Amino acid sequence: MADLKKIAIASDHGAFELKELLVSKLQELGYEPDDMGVNSEESADYPDYGEKVAKAVSAGEVERGILLCGTGIGMSITANKFPNVRAALVHDHFTATMSKKHNNANILVMGARILDVETAYEILKAWLDTEYEGGRHDRRLEKISNLEKSGALKNNV
Ligand code: RB5
């Protein structure tokens, strides 16, 4: 199992400032963020940075990742293309805790143009501290995993 303290994180230009704040917050909380960019507010394409984090999670190099863009929508669409990735776009404490309890989300996605910084910190903390409940949810996650394996989604059947 990958080191639980290590968390991959990336954003596009629309969330650069929030990403920098979350990197510091993660360090403060004792985590080891692996910052995969961007490194400035210069315009960047979110799929390029979503791919970096999603690949690391998909390959099991890290257990968890965080992706940020303006709305969070582009990053969540990108990340969920990768096998074994369960990326959750969340907006508040409730959706953050549910994304772990029921969906065992391994990538947290937020929209920097939607959330204030305090809410983003609250979401981050809730997602990090909440445990997956397992039980009946295992069956549902397994069904998602089977869809990936069967290629059904790719072939539209
Ligand atoms: C960039 O302008 C913006 O489209 C991006 O940050 C994100 O919101 C996409 O879903």
Image (spheres, helix red, strand yellow):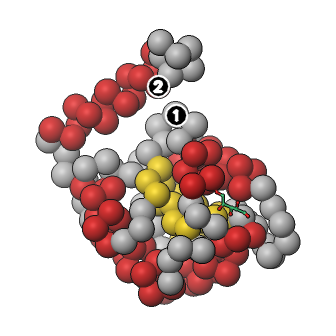
Could you say whether the residue bearing mark 2 is in a helix, strand or loop? helix
Secondary-structure class at tag 1: loop
Q: Position of residue 139 (x, y in %)?
A: 22, 31
Out of 125 and 70, give the one closest to the viewer.
Answer: 70
Where does label 2 land, which residue? 148
Residue at 21%, 40% in the rendered image = 137
Q: Residue 149 vs residue 61: left or right?
A: left
Query: Which residue type carries mark 1?
Result: Pro
Q: Residue at x 46, y 20 (%)?
A: 149
* Residue at 47% over, 37% down: 84
- Where's residue 89, x and y in %? 46, 57
First along the sequence among labels 2 and 1: 1
Amino acid type assigned to the residue bearing label 2 in the image: Glu
Per the rendering, the mark at residue 83 is: 1
Q: Image quadrant of ligand 1? A: bottom right
- Residue 134 position, x and y percent, is 19, 45
State yes or no: Cβ of the residue under disc 1 lies below 8 Å from any atom of ligand 1: no
Residue most extreme to the left: 135
> Vertical placement of 16 versus 36: above or below?
below
